[in-house]
Image (cartoon, rainbow, N blue to C red):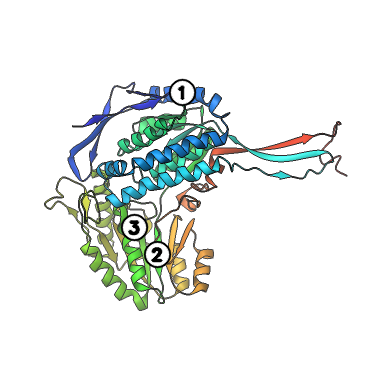
Amino acid sequence: MAKSAWNFIDGKWQTSSSGEIFESRNPADQRDVIGNYPESNQADVEKAVQAAEAAYTDWRLVPPPKRADIILKASRILLERKETIARLMTREMGKVLKEARGDVQEAIDMAQYVAGEGRRLFGQTTTSELRNKFAMTVRMPIGICGLITPWNFPVAIPSWKILPALICGNTVVFKPAEDTPACAVEFVKALEDAGLPRGVVNMIHGGVIAGEAIVHHPKIRLVSFTGSSEVGRKVASQCGKNLKRCSLEMGGKNAQIVMEDADLELALEGALWGAFGTSGQRCTATSRIYVHQKLYDRFRRTLVERAKKLVLGNGIKAGVDVGPVINGEQLKRIHHYVEIGVREGAKLECGGRILKSKGLERGFFYEPTIFTQVKPEMTIMREEIFGPVTCIMPIKNFDQAIQEVNRTDYGLSSSIYTHDIDRAMKAIRDIEAGITYINGPTIGAEVHLPFGGVKCTGNGHREAGETALDIFSEWKSVFIDYSGKLQKAQIDAD
């Protein structure tokens, strides 16, 4: 029996002004309806903004360690509910259960980390150029933050945005993805049950109408968006018109390099996990693999053999390696890219099919797919597919590998497998990406390190780690003159 859930505004669960609903269904079995959710409109966003504005008056004055107490309590609640939320996540968005548990754990880790920042919202004290004058900097909250999150990490990514916003003293209007509303509800319930004051976090379900209302609302002073580069450009354009702070985390076309001195087994494990974990639906997924020509044949042959052995199915079942993709539209998009790859002359080594065999016919399953005989200018080597598809290309040397890795409009994650410390250090220096792994896959972020990329991957901000505070707070410079007379900086500095 499907459940109904509502928007969360001013500490109350309530229906949408539109009266319309949408369904959340299991991508592994479309007969399974998780629940019905409100299709929100501008009026709902307006209510949420009003609640956030009223709550901001007091919340910004709550001492950060007290804010941290609530966030830390939320981490404990999430830990208690980890298995329940993970199973819901697998049911709602399809990732296998062990990955869903990791998603929830990432939110727990983020809550614990951000709670620690409640006593580390450090500024600086510094010297003044004038006598009897003191100077320092402090962090100040921004105001109401509009946070728009995707479906592929439906608990972790909201935690990356909501929790740093809260610790800095902001209030929030949160819109989760339409494909994963149930997971968002559970995250907000953890904050509610932790004692978060009413109006501090408000959640609006819905699609484009609700999202655009958040981006355009004049009282929302910051928009943080994770999603496609196409939508991100529109968000940035609108925010720019209104001189509104905007943080974007968008796509990737991530590459793994395998040099001739690499641990071949380790590189294969990394490629398999990086390309097909979460059914390739990660912005850090390994979609290009450059292998030294001395290892190329062995690597290609073994990776294809192992990809063919991956078990597809409902991620709640033991032994399943790869779950479904998120919805029918994404399934068609992935297959469209595969058809383009074949048409442009790439060799399909394995996969390339929408699966409708027994046990999979009710879901959105795509075979793990590997292309070879690819060229840099091919569409599948340039554009983000966001599915279980990767390409392998031979390279002659390290310099060619770096050149090919950088031949993309994106710059999120990268990886190199080598035992040569000189190559490793040069890769760190020369690869154009926000993240570089040495002897590890392109996926696997940790909450205390900055996350984000260059070029079309983002607009310069970094989520997670201490750097997230720079998104959600303003710097204020403070001068205290105790000379008892007018002092003119630069003029009286002699």
From the viewer's perspective, is 184 left or right of 321?
A: right
Q: Residue furthest bottom?
A: 294
The one nearer the camera, 480 or 432, is 480
In which quarter of the view is residue 362 placed? top left
Residue at x-position 34% and y-position 36%: 186
Amino acid type at circle 2 is Gln
Instruction: Tell me the tag on residue 19.
Output: none
The one nearer the camera, 290 or 199, is 199
Label 1 belongs to which residue? 51
Q: Position of residue 470 (x, y in %)?
A: 56, 43
Q: Secondary structure at mark 3?
A: helix
Vertical comparison of 296 with 307: above or below: below
Vertical comparison of 92 with 293: above or below: above
Q: Secondary structure at mark 1?
A: helix
Amino acid type at circle 3 is Thr
The one nearer the camera, 336 or 420, is 420
Label 2 belongs to which residue? 256
- Disc number lying in front (2 or 3): 2
Q: Earlier in the sequence, mark 3 or mark 1?
A: 1
Label 3 belongs to which residue? 379
Q: Position of residue 197 (x, y in %)?
A: 47, 27
Determine the CA span between mark 3 and mark 1.
46 Å
Residue 229 at least partly seen: no
Q: Earlier in the sequence, mark 2 or mark 3?
A: 2
Q: Secondary structure at mark 2?
A: strand
Number of labels in the image equals 3
Residue 372 at least partly seen: yes
Q: Earlier in the sequence, mark 2 or mark 1?
A: 1
Determine the CA span between mark 2 and mark 1.
46 Å
Image quarter in which the N terminus is found: top left
- Disc number lying in front (2 or 1): 1
Residue at x-position 38% and y-position 64%: 376
